[in-house]
Structures are given as C-alpha cells and as structure tokens.
Image (cartoon, rainbow, N blue to C red):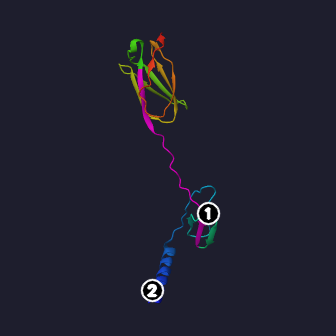
C-alpha cells in the first residue's frame, strides 16, 4: 500500500511540475540584504528562489536550469517616514497686549518657498499643513508696528508662536 501511495505521489508531483512549466511566465524577484549577506541574483532559468538559510551561507548560489536559488539574510525595505504636517499659529500684539489686525505673517522655508496669512481683528494667525522637521522663518509686516523675525524648527503642533511689537514706526 505504501508503494502505491509513493507512486501516486510521484505521478502527481510530475504532472504538477509539467503544468507549472507549461503555464509559467518569466518573472523577477528582487530583495535587499543585511550586512553584505545574501544575494538575489539567479540567471539562466524561469524560476528563482531567494532564501535566508544563515549568514555563513550568505551569497551562495545554486543554479540548475530552469531553477535557481540564492541563500542569505534578507532585509525588508523599511517604509520611509512620511513628512507629517501640523498647524502652527499664534497672536500678534502691540502695546498693552492688544491684538494687531491685518498684519501680514510670512512663513518661509529653507528652500525660499513662502506662505502668507493675515491676522484677524484680534491679532491671531494660523498656518495649516506645515511640514514637521523643517526650519522656517516667521516674519510680521504691518504699516504701524515693527516685529523681530523668529526662526523656528517645527517638531509638533504649536499655536503659541506670538509676536509683540518692538516699537511704533
């Protein structure tokens, strides 16, 4: 009985192998490696297999047409962090902490790209979707007041970037 099962298993294996070879399409698998271990090159065949069998075997290749196998450690491609965006804002005030309305707030990044906002009647301004991790220059322009610019590095949401007038013009 065991002989019959072995024969049937071999017949099924050969039939499946033949079917796979008939319907196979050429393809390529690419993988990165850790510490120089492994290799993803397999040539001369339709099928290739990369595996992680151990660092001592890293880079060994087994090639017999139509199959190829390369062994070694794999490293997954880590997802690059995306630049998150936050809201920054604050208040522009003059003497006695009164809000300065209609002041032009300029937000300039390292590349010279500039965004503008106007203060509301109470002196508040706001910039949405500001990239985290970048450095900016904040400047205020108003016809009656003068303000010192601020250099900020954005690491989190901040709605307390306030400006107080230096002097009257």
Q: Nearer the viewer, mark 1 or mark 2?
A: 2
- Residue 157's place in the image compared with 67, above or below, is above
Which residue is drawn at the image coordinates 56% and 56% (left, top)?
Answer: 75
Residue corresponding to mark 1: 41
Q: Nearer the viewer, residue 48 or 93?
A: 93
Residue 71 percent across, percent down from the top left: 60, 65
Which residue is drawn at the image coordinates 44% and 22% (left, top)?
Answer: 162
Per the image, is 74 magenta? yes
- Numbered disc 2: secondary structure: helix
Which residue is drawn at the image coordinates 49% and 72% (left, top)?
Answer: 23
Q: Residues within 10 Å of mark 2 (few under 14, many from 20)?
A: few
Residue corresponding to mark 2: 5
Q: Residues within 10 Å of mark 1 (few under 14, many from 20)?
A: some
Q: Specify whether 143 is left or right of 57.
A: left
What is the magenta range?
66-91
- Residue 16's place in the image compared with 72, above or below, is below
Residue 121 percent across, percent down from the top left: 35, 19
Q: CA distance from mark 1 to mark 2?
A: 37 Å
């Amino acid at each position: 009985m065991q002989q019959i099962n072995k024969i049937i298993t071999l017949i099924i294996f050969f039939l499946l192998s033949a079917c796979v070879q008939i319907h196979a399409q050429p393809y390529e698998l690419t993988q990165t490696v850790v510490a120089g271990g492994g290799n993803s090159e397999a040539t001369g065949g339709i099928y290739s297999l990369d595996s992680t069998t151990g660092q001592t075997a890293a880079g060994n290749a087994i090639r017999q047409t139509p199959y190829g196998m390369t062994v070694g450690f794999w490293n997954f491609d880590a997802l690059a962090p995306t630049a998150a965006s936050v809201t920054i804002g604050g208040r522009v005030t003059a003497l006695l902490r009164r809000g300065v309305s209609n002041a032009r707030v300029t937000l300039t990044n390292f590349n010279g790209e500039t965004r503008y906002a106007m203060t509301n009647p109470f002196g508040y301004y706001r910039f949405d979707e500001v990239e985290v991790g970048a450095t900016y220059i904040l400047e205020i322009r108003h016809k009656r007041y003068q303000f010192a610019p601020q250099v900020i590095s954005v690491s989190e949401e901040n709605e307390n970037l306030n400006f107080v007038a230096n002097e009257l013009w």
